[in-house]
Structures are given as C-alpha cells and as structure tokens.
Image: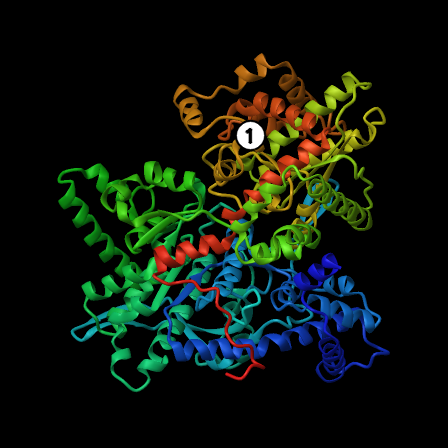
C-alpha cells in the first residue's frame, strides 16, 4: 500500500472529481476548440484536445503570477539567448502541475493511450545542443525557485534540422515544427515592437539620431513556464519577424506593387531558421540581424516594463533610469546577445539623454555574461564593414567603449602596446573585426564559466589580461540540469524507488540524494535500482525495434555516446575502441567477452565535412561488426538517428555506460554527463568540464577516469604531438588505423576515409592517439566490473547519491545570489482557486 501511495503522490493525485473535470474539458476542447466530432477525430486531434485541457490549468496560475509580480515589483531577471532547446511540453507541464495520474486515468477512461498522444507532439528544437538545453533547464529552475524571470529569444519557424541517415550518410531535412500549430504559445500582437537596421547616423547639437533605417516589426509569442508544484508560471517570450504594412510599398512604381508585397518575405526571413552550428562561428549577415533583432525587441520590452511597473506608474521616480540595475538583471547566454550592451547604451544616451558615464554605469551593473567555450573557432568576431552597414550607431558606440577601455589599460600599463592590441575590442589585421567576447567582458559586472575547470582556464589563459585588471568580475557557475525533466519525467521508475527510501522532497532539493548512501549495502535497494535499469533497457530495446527495425541484446552493456558530432568530443576515439574490441573478439572468439551494444548519436553541422565523415565511419564500422557471425550479439554498433531532446529522454534512462571523452580542456562543462549520472549510468571520461566535479562529488574511484589532464595536454603541446609515434608503438592502434585506411570498412571505396586518417596522423588538434592506450585499458576495467552486477550497482548508487550538486536549482540559486542580487524562494503562491 505504501508503494502505491508513493506512486500516486509523485505523479499527482488522481481524484475522482479531478478526472471527471479533465474528461469534461477534454471533450469540450475536442468539440469547441478543434471543432471535431469523436467519430472523425484523429490521434492528433486527441493530442491537441489534451494539450488544451492541460493548458487550461496553466492559464489561471500564469495570469496570477504576472499580477503578483506587478504588485510586488520584485527585481526581474532577463535571460537572453538565441537558443531555447525545449523539447516537448505536455508531459513536463503535467509533472510540474501534479496532473500526470489524473490525465492518465482520464485518457484511459476515454479509451485513449496517453503515451500515444504524447508522441504526437513535435519537439520545440530551437537549439543546437548544450547551450540551448541549458537555457531550457534554467527556465524550469527559475520558475521553481520563484524568481521573476523571463526567457527572451527568437521564434524560429524552422528549428534544428531533422537528421536522416541514408546509406550511412547524414541527410538534413527542414524541421517544420509549427506545421500543425503550437498549442503552448500565445501570440501577443499588442506588444509588437519596431526594430531598425541600416540607415546612417546624424550628429546634431541636441544629440545623435539614427535615421533612414529599414524597420522590421517584432511580434512576441509567449509560452508559459511552470515551476514545480508552486503555482508559479513564468514566461518565455520569443520574437517573430513581421514586415510593416508599408514595407517597400511607399516606393513602388507602376506594376511594382505585387513585387513589393512578395518582398515582405525578405524581411520576415530574420526569424525563419536556426543556424545549425554548435561551437562554431559563421559570420553571416542574417545571423547578425538575428542577434540584433532579439536584443532590440527585448530591450524595448524591458524598459517598457520597468517604466510601467506599479511603483512608477504615476510618479516621476520610474522615469529615472538610474535605478534600472536595482530592478533589472540581464544575463547574456554566450556572446550571441552581446549587442544588448551597445543597444542599452544607445537607448540611454540617444533616447533618454543620459551622460555617457551614467549610461555606462547603468549598463555594466545591469549586464552579466556567461562564456560557453574556449575553442577559438567558436568565438564571435564580426567584420567591421558588416557592422558599419547594418548597425552604424552601434559601431560608433563600440568604438567609444573601446577608446575609453584602452585609455584605462594604457594608464595601468604605460607603453605596453602588445597588451593594448590583445585587449582591444577591435582586432586589426586583414579585415578589422569586433571581438564580441571582449565587448561582453568590458560591458558586464560579472563574467562566468560553466564548470570550475573552465572558469579557471578562462582566468589563466583566454581572458587572462582581463582577469588581471578586473579579477572581481570573474566567477564560476557550474552547470546543472532540471531533475523534473531529467529524472521524474523521463525515469519515473527510478524516481519512485528513490522516493520510497527518502521521500519526494529531493525533487525540489536534489542535495538530499546524498542520504541514499546509507542504502549502498541494502540488498533490496540494490536489487530495485538494478531492476529499474533493466526495465528501462527492455523498453528502449523495444523502441529501437519499432522505430529502426534493429534487434539488440538487452542483457548487453548499453555503452552510449550521444552529443553533437565534433572532433573535440572525440567520437573517433570511441570508434577506435569499437574496432579494437572487434579485432580482439575475432582473435579469441571463445573468450568470455562482456557483451556490449555501443550506441552513438548526434547531429553534424551541415557544413562540417569532417563531422559528416565521422558519421559515415560509425555506420560503416556498424555494417561490418553487426554482420559478422563470429561476433554474434557480443558486440553491436548502433548509430542513433536524429538525436534530440525526446530521444535523450528515452536513451539516457537505459544507458549503463556514459562516454564523456573530450580532450581535457575543450568541453566547457557538458550537461549530458550529469543526466547519465542521475539516471544510473556509470561514466567513462577524461578530467574535463564538469566530469572533474562529478568525480569530486561521487568519489573518483566511482568513475572510470582516464587520459591526459589539462597540464599533460599543455606539456604535449610544448613538446609537439607526434601521432606517428603512437601509431608505430601500439600494434592494436596501428591495426585499427590500417583497417580504416585500407578499406576494411569500405570495401567498395577503399580510400573513403583517407581524410579522417590523414587528419588523425598529421593534424589532430585533439590528440586522439595520445589517450588511446589509457582509454582501452580503462574500458577493460569497465567490462570486468559489469560482470559483477552487485558491485556495478553499488557504484551506480554512489553516483546517484553524488548528483545533488548538478541540479540547475543549485546553479540558478548561485546566479541569483552572486550575480543578479536576487533571493530564491521555495514558497508556494496561492493557487487560482484559493481565495487570495
């Protein structure tokens, strides 16, 4: 009985009245909202009816939360990001509103299967990977911690492409996610804002004017963001581009009218499509337009809300923007929204007529910048001529910011011209460029990395010059993940087993997981944890068979590497292990090998040739390995097609081994690593990103750590990395490389992978061979431990118990107190049906 009760409470109470109401409202929506009769309704209609029914439960809370903010006038935080990788919304909303059991029961009574309905929802794929998914986790935590928070971004008509694999190659198709409509958004045309581009700058005695601009309208769409069972619902506001009615029509000549109307499309292209690059900068004008578009629309909104909020509605006080930093915090998610800094300056100086010094003080105290990468190819450097053309006033402001900045540095380091060159916002050379990271550091009061090791690297190397003059600006904020989506929602079995032992408060306070340590020798708990994993593996095996027609051995170790395909993430190191394992099984087919199913998934940027070749290599290795009867089901290689949030929610709970094998010093944090840890997988990884802190929290003996540390990589750089030395010294490595280059995996086209081999042998920035030997040895330890289910599971328990730090609730609590000057709260506010 206790177990049943726990299950009901974690998923919400399925009260009789509740269920009856849900059925009534479901039928009402089917009839009145969707205008469908039950006889002709499709599965999609049923999904929309359920979505609208659940959405009804958000609306009252949403209105009341915003009213509450208006009355209390708290400091507000604005999280600016060009990406929000939200995934699906229906189940997450049910979890956070405690409606899951009631909806389950209601749909069951209506003769429907809720899982089938949930599968009708499209992912909101408005992000590439870690950075966009982090923004989504942060929204969940900000609402759960009762912060007056707003996510601001772009409503891309087409999100991250859908990936098909055809003959082993990635093929992209457009993600038309809005085709059937989006029940979770509400258009807000009453808050439409103009955004200006191009034009020229006029300097008059009475101030500066930016004139003759092209205007594009920003139309906001609001999506509710519910906190976990606290009746708070925050807002994510995404802007869509609209051409103004008079667009090009004023200058049409006879017969030009039709063309002028068709040209409206050009303006609206701004919010058409997400740039599909992860950790890579592509300096295209359309992308710069997107970056300014979101910033300009958002800042108008922020200032409107600041001036209109209750305490300033009649008094002069709120017309005075000097108090802006007391009421507004702006967090820049990487440099993509960096234009917020010059745009806020432009508003304060040109529109509000403040002096430079006052405006600059307000701007710096309001803005803060999160750095997400140290890879040089990912840093944004915009050509000055592009700026001059598109945003002439902003370029002037950046030049003045730079002049004053360099004046300060000059005074601190007289005659150090090389330091001035290194620290300038303007990079000279071939064509002049604006270094957006430098702009962010100079224009923000706080700069943070996303894991301790990354924050240290920033201070010691990439931004050392800036750290030397402003050490107080630099902070660490180790990333986290929301335990609502990444445990309660995607792994209810595990969430239950934990709640049976320690109650369900841990869902709000993940640090409570450490009390699981007292059950590490409890046989019943060990068995429960192992059983949940086995159920999840069986379920995923069924999914793979249904979706991709591949049969796998659910008793094998599920060895998983899912993330964007990139050389620094070293999917190639994983490939070399697969080939080595294959060769060993072929050599000693009668040995008792630990069976493995190795799954690799992730998208390659469409223009990233090497990444696309890596996918082809993985699938080619799979063709050989999976069809070798000697190997049988002791080794299988699966490429997981179209990896996205919704697939992550299925594969992560089923994984036994998590591959986190980037070269030390390259993965800023990683968050997938945390999701696997929370869901009962063990980690094989380098001392990189948050892996370092995971090892610290769970005990290094409870992770499979291998490979060079950052200091070893630096030493190898100094000495010079020579791939050939490893190739000649390690026979199994030589064999694997020779097989790849000799056409063993591409018999039809022997030199198919010559580019990959040449890269590995001659110019491998990420030193795959240097970590090969240690990786293979470490994998042997993994295989040995997996044979002992009890010891493996005890290690899993240590990992789950060490997960508390990696909740995004902890991360956001630190941003709030240490950067935004806000105090998080776990208080509930009154539900809409409570008297106020």
Q: Dot 1: within a 10 Å radius of its alpha carbon, few (fewer than 14), some, or many (20 or more) residues?
A: few
**Residue 325 at x, y percent in the picture:** 30, 66
Q: Is residue 207 above or below residue 130?
A: below
Q: Nearer the viewer, residue 262 or 93?
A: 93
| Occupied quadrant, residue 525 | top right
Q: Nearer the viewer, residue 767 or 367?
A: 367
Q: Residue at x 25, y 47 (%)?
A: 470
**Residue 624 at x, y percent in the picture:** 77, 29
The residue wearing badge 1 is: 701
Q: Residue at x 56, y 42 (%)?
A: 608
Whether residue 397 is visible to the viewer of this picture, yes or no, is: yes
**Residue 829 at x, y percent in the picture:** 50, 73
Q: Is residue 26 above or below residue 740?
A: below
Whether residue 125 is visible to the viewer of this picture, yes or no, is: no
Horizontal side of 519 relative to 62 (left or right) equals right
Q: Residue at x 36, y 41 (%)?
A: 458
**Residue 818 at x, y percent in the picture:** 35, 55
Q: Nearer the viewer, residue 363 or 606?
A: 363
| Occupied quadrant, residue 533 | top right
Element assignment for label 1: helix
């Amino acid at each position: 009985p206790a177990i049943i009760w726990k299950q009901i409470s974690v998923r919400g109470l399925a009260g009789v009245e509740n269920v009856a109401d849900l059925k009534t409202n479901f039928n009402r929506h089917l009839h009145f909202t969707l205008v469908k009769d039950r006889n002709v309704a499709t599965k999609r209609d049923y999904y929309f009816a359920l979505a609208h029914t659940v959405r009804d439960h958000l609306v009252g809370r949403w209105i009341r939360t915003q009213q509450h903010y208006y009355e209390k006038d708290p400091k507000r935080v604005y999280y600016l990001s060009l990406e929000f990788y939200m995934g699906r919304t229906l189940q997450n909303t049910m979890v956070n509103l405690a409606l899951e059991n009631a909806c389950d029961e209601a749909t069951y009574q209506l003769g429907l299967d809720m899982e089938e309905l949930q599968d009708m929802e499209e992912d909101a794929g408005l992000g590439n990977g870690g950075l966009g998914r982090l923004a989504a986790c942060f929204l969940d935590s900000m609402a759960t911690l009762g912060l007056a928070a707003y996510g601001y971004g772009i409503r891309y008509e087409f999100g991250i492409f859908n990936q098909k694999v055809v003959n082993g190659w990635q093929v992209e198709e457009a993600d038309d996610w809005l085709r059937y409509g989006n029940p979770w958004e509400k258009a807000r045309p009453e808050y439409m804002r103009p955004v200006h581009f191009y034009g020229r700058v006029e300097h008059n005695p009475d101030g500066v004017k930016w004139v003759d601009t092209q205007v594009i309208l920003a139309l906001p769409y609001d999506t509710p963001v519910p906190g976990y069972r606290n009746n708070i619902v925050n807002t994510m506001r995404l802007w869509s581009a609209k051409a103004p009615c008079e667009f090009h029509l004023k200058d049409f000549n006879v017969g030009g009218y039709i063309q002028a109307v068709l040209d409206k499309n050009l303006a609206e292209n701004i919010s058409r499509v997400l740039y599909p690059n992860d950790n890579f900068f592509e300096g295209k004008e359309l992308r710069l337009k997107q970056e300014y578009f979101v910033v300009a629309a958002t800042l108008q909104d922020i200032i409107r809300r600041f001036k209109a909020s209750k305490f300033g509605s009649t008094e002069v006080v709120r017309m005075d923007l000097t108090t802006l930093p007391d009421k507004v915090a702006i967090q820049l998610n990487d440099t993509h929204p960096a234009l917020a800094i010059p745009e806020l300056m432009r508003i304060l100086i040109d529109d509000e007529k403040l002096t430079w010094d006052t405006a600059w003080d307000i701007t710096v105290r309001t803005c803060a910048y999160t750095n997400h990468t140290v890879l040089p190819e990912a840093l944004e450097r915009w050509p000055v001529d592009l700026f001059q053309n598109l945003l002439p006033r902003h370029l002037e402001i950046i030049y003045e910011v730079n002049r004053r900045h360099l004046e300060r540095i000059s005074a601190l380091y007289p005659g150090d011209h090389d330091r001035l060159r290194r620290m300038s916002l303007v990079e000279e050379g071939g064509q002049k460029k604006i270094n957006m990271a430098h702009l962010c550091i100079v224009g923000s009061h706080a700069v943070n990395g996303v894991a301790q090791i990354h924050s240290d690297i920033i201070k010691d190397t990439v931004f050392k010059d800036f750290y030397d003059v402003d050490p107080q600006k630099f902070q660490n904020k180790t990333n986290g993940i929301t335990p609502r989506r990444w445990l309660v929602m995607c792994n209810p079995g595990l969430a239950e087993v934990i709640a049976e032992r320690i109650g369900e408060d841990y869902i709000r306070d993940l640090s409570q997981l450490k009390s699981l340590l007292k059950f590490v020798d409890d046989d019943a708990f060990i068995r429960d944890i192992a059983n949940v994993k086995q159920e999840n593996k069986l379920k995923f095996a069924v999914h793979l068979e249904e979706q991709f027609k591949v049969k796998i051995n659910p008793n094998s170790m599920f060895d998983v590497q899912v993330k964007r395909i990139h050389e620094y993430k070293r999917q190639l190191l994983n490939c070399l292990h697969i080939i080595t394992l294959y060769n060993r099984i072929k050599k000693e087919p009668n040995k008792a090998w630990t069976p493995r199913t190795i799954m690799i998934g992730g998208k390659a940027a469409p223009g990233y040739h090497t990444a696309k070749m890596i996918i082809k290599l993985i699938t080619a290795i799979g063709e050989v390995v999976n069809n070798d009867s000697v190997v049988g089901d002791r080794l299988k290689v699966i490429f997981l097609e179209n990896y996205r949030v919704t697939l992550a929610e299925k594969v992560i709970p089923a994984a036994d081994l998590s591959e986190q094998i980037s070269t030390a010093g390259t993965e800023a944090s990683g968050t997938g690593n945390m999701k696997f840890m929370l869901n009962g997988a063990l980690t094989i990884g380098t001392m990189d990103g948050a892996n370092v802190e995971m090892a610290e929290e769970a005990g290094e003996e409870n992770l499979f750590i291998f490979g060079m540390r950052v200091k070893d990589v630096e030493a190898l750089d100094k000495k010079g990395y020579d791939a050939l030395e490893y190739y000649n010294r390690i026979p199994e490595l030589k064999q694997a490389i020779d097989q790849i280059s000799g056409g063993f995996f591409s018999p039809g086209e022997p030199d198919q992978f010559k580019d990959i081999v040449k890269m590995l042998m001659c110019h491998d920035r990420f030193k795959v061979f240097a970590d090969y030997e240690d990786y293979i040895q470490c994998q042997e330890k993994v295989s040995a431990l997996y044979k002992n289910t009890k010891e493996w599971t005890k290690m899993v328990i240590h990992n789950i118990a060490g997960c508390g730090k990696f909740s995004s609730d902890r991360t956001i609590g630190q941003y709030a107190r240490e950067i935004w000057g806000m105090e998080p709260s776990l208080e509930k506010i009154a539900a809409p049906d409570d008297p106020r």
